[in-house]
Amino acid sequence: MHNVIPHSILPDAPDSFCSYLARQFVAKQGYSIGLVAEAAPLAENCDISLMHHDGYSLNLVCLIDREANPGKTFGLTAEAVSDIGKACLQHTGRIHRAKMPVKIQIMEVGPEDATARERLKPMRPSSIFSKVQPSGWIVDPSNHTIWNNSLFGSWTPPAGFIRKLMTRPRETGLVAPVAPAVAHVAPGFPYLTTGIIAVLCAIFAAEIGFGVDPWAGFLQPSIETLLAFGGIYRPLVMQGEWLRLFSGPLLHADVLHLLLNCAALYISGRILEGVVGRAWLAATFVIGAISGALFSLAFNPENLVSVGASGAVMALFATLLVLAFHFPKGADRTALLMNSIYVLVASMVPVTSSGGKVDIAAHAGGALGGVVMGGLLLAIWRQDEAHPRFARFGGAIGIAGLAAFIFAFTALPQNYREGVMRASIVPESETPKNAAEWRSRAIDLMKKYPRDPRPRYFRAVDLIEAKDMPAAERELRAGLAEFDLWRKVINPEFAMHMQVALAVVLAPDRLPEAQAVAKPTCAWAKGATRELLDDNKLCE
């Protein structure tokens, strides 16, 4: 003998599958018994009526118990059901100005009769855009079959849930769930979020105030400025400037780019800071920034300079999307899901300001990092706790990220000098097409771009032919003086050509010095260049 725990849900209902289904809807799907007042005519035609209202959408379920009441059918027309749905729309909310729908599911539960499908078939939306979405269902537990008139038929939710109930042993003692008191979204003042926004604005102000070139358009720093401040540029990163992966996410391409990211950061950060605490918010921001930067580096074109905190912002929204499932079905979960999905989907649309290009790779990488963080937090967050555990670990990630961000900007002085050099050389639009053009324009280009070593080299070639070795030496040394700055801007092999020319100039009168200058070029030189070195005994 064993004791059977009585049901606290519908204790007086008959022991039919319809009653069992209703108890399961209440216990596991978040439904409540009864309907809103506007749906009273619907309730009068149901044996059991259920409702799920999360503050946004409204789901009404009308159950007809054909086991307890053989031959009973649903008595309202499709037009009457539609009118009831329209009256209930006042209870649905809006998400981004879009009115949420009312769903009405008419379920006849019990043996199916020959006319059931024809009777319930008209219970469907008037159009795909209709805000009232009725559907007709036939649930036959004796044959384990489910039919409904929606587009996806028996695969439409909650068909899978009902199918499992029909094939598994019945549970007893079902009770309505009690939501944990701590599971709610109630953000306070977002101190950390506000601090991050202030830092991003300060860095952007520095981009505008101390740019390598004057800003253009709508407060838009030049590409040279973004590179100087640490924008992510694959050729430079692959040359060893990995710190750009930490500095790039803190820069922005123009003021609209900054404002959009700061607005999204405030919306997501304010909620996440209240939900998981500042430590885990900091960790999520860091992980999102780095994963977005890595995806940008891996998947963007080589010539693209990537900047912006959007990877970190996408991580915050993706984390909220996953963490929504920590909350019971209701307004909090729906709001987190809908707002997160809305932003994440919109972020993949390639539209931007200033004629630029949305860094979808960074968005995708940040979102993936956010999903991973959300999964981790969901796994360690107990239902009886206000925040996820191991906040110290999250804080350690945040502090390590802060240290990396700060350290990344220690490269700013060198990057800035290189950026100034990049802005000081002959632009591509004015670059001569061949050596003869370089030589013919060398004097004019030297006057206009005195820091560019290339006009000086070709001027030195002319001076060597004119036997003016002191003047040639002067031009070559001036060009080589800033090699450490222009070696990443101009092909570093160009320095080899300049050193060969300087060694040749020095060889007649100062052979030891000339050999020291030529030494780095001896292993590199080939063909005619090597013959020139050998003829002047520069590699002995």
Image (spheres, rainbow, N blue to C red):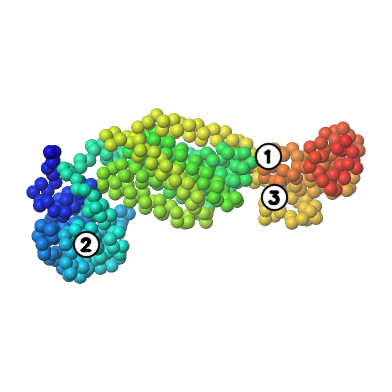
Q: Is residue 259 left or right of residue 388?
A: right
Q: Is residue 308 left or right of residue 478?
A: left
Residue under circle 3?
426
Residue under circle 2?
137
Q: Nearer the viewer, residue 306 or 361?
A: 361
The answer to which image quadrant residue 434 occupies is bottom right
Residue under circle 1?
485
Q: Position of residue 37 (x, y in %)?
A: 13, 56
Of the numbered discs 2 and 3, the one sitting upstream in the chain is: 2
Q: Element at badge 2?
A: strand
Of the numbered discs 3 and 1, the one sitting upstream in the chain is: 3
Label 2, label 3: how many angstroms apart (C-alpha)? 74 Å
Q: Quadrant of the N terminus?
A: top left
Q: Amino acid at mark 2?
A: Trp
Q: Position of residue 239 (x, y in %)?
A: 64, 41
Picture disc at residue 73: none
Of the numbered discs 2 and 1, the one sitting upstream in the chain is: 2
